[in-house]
Image (cartoon, rainbow, N blue to C red):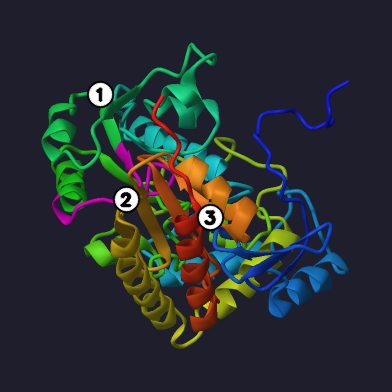
Amino acid sequence: MPITPLMPVYPRCGVRPVRGEGAWLIGERGERYLDMAGGIAVNILGHGHPALVKAIADQAATLMHVSNLYGSPQGEHFAQRLVDKTFADTVFFTNSGAEAVECAIKTARRYHFADGRPEKNRIIAFSNAFHGRTMGAISATNQPKMREGFEPLLPGFTVVPFNDLAAAEAAIGPDAAAFLVEPVQGEGGILPATQEFLSGLRRLADENGMLLILDEVQCGYARTGTFFAHEQYGLTPDIMAVAKGIGGGFPLGACLATEEAAKGMVIGTHGSTYGGNPLAMAAGEAVLDIVGEQGFLDEVKRLGERLRAALEQMIPNHDHLFQEVRGLGLMLGIKLKSDSRAFVAHLRDNHGLLTVAGGDNVVRLLPPLTIDEGHIAECVERLSAGARSYQVPAAA
């Protein structure tokens, strides 16, 4: 028998949380951790936020799930709020980011099918990306660690270098249906798209009869200081995948689209047993109530600038270890000169600070958006202490 009955697909560490309080996680022996990982950008209201807890409890006592064969007053209301705040005209609710990306891919292909151009079915995606773990999502990446052992992957995807507009343009052909891109790559190492690149993709899509799909699963929902990251680039997509922060910890995602881009998604083309259930909608409404409060986004920007400034002030004191700070808002990364995974483990095990490793030897900081100055000071103090006590592993 295995040590645990859970399928061993995660390298689970020794942190075993049983309770959360705001920006803190408490383990089963009472140990406390400052959570600057936020469930990998999910717990945007922290742990145990009273408004979110009450909304879920009240809805659970009222109605948790019904089939999507029936009308959904809860889904209609929440979807309308999202439409009112975004570029979109229509919403499909999912249970995860990968499902939202899957819906986005299907929506793009179905658009061209409905337009009488079924040959336009190829998605152009970008290196270093992470779109989820479904077969469609891993087909849209070139990372061997996600692809190995799962071939044959789905046809109809081309991957070109991120932030390389010339490569994106060169990949266009008569069969090109859409670009799929993260405005800020998360798992790839907190890499924002350049203005030239993202604006260029919008222009190329328009010029070539393609759609622009944005994956804002990690960088969206107030994480970067605007409701969605693309707002900072002055453009809008045709389709967008959303998840993580939208439910504040409750499993929820969404695919948002314009009416034109979604014109092929008619009855019978897509579905989800649990997507848009009343319990998820109640959680989503509670999160949106708070994110939509006056000054919430301004405070995320302010705290993001404060955290970035503190990190940049800290780096010269440990220049043997740290290289630079990246990111937007409260989606920040510290690039290391050595393996970030080892340093993340050191911070966790020896200094009670939870962060997330990312690509390109980056330590990701994705805290609750409700942190305060005290949490920032505590984070930087623990980072500094961790840097002082850390022994860089010898090169192999």
Q: Can residue 49 be seen in this view?
A: yes
Q: What residue type is labelled 3?
A: Thr
Distance in Å between CA atoms under marks 1 and 3: 41 Å
- Would residue 246 appear left or right of 191 to someone viewing this image? right
The C terminus: image quadrant: top left
Which residue is pictured at 56% across the width and 41% down the height?
A: 99
- According to the picture, the residue beneath numbered tag 3 turns out to be 355
User: Label for residue 221?
Assistant: none
Indicate the secondary structure of the residue bearing disc 2. loop
Percent position (x, y) of residue 325? Answer: 31, 59
Say left or right for 173 vs 159. Answer: left
Q: Tell me which label, 2 or 1, sits earlier in the chain.
A: 1
State which region is magenta: 179-196
**Which amino acid, by three-letter code, is at mark 1?**
Asp
Specify whether 117 is left or right of 84.
left
Residue 354 sits in quarter = bottom right
Residue 210: x and y, percent?
24, 38
> Residue at coordinates 70% horizontally, 79% vertically from top-left?
51
Q: Tell me the mark number nearer the camera, choosing from 2 and 1.
A: 2
Q: Mark 2 — residue?
A: 320
Q: Nearer the viewer, residue 142 or 362?
A: 362
Nearest to the observer: residue 80 or residue 307: 307
Q: Name the residue under label 1.
A: 175
> Closer to the observer: label 2 or label 3?
2
Which SS class for mark 3? loop
37 or 344: nearer the viewer: 344
In the picture, which quadrant includes the N terminus?
top right
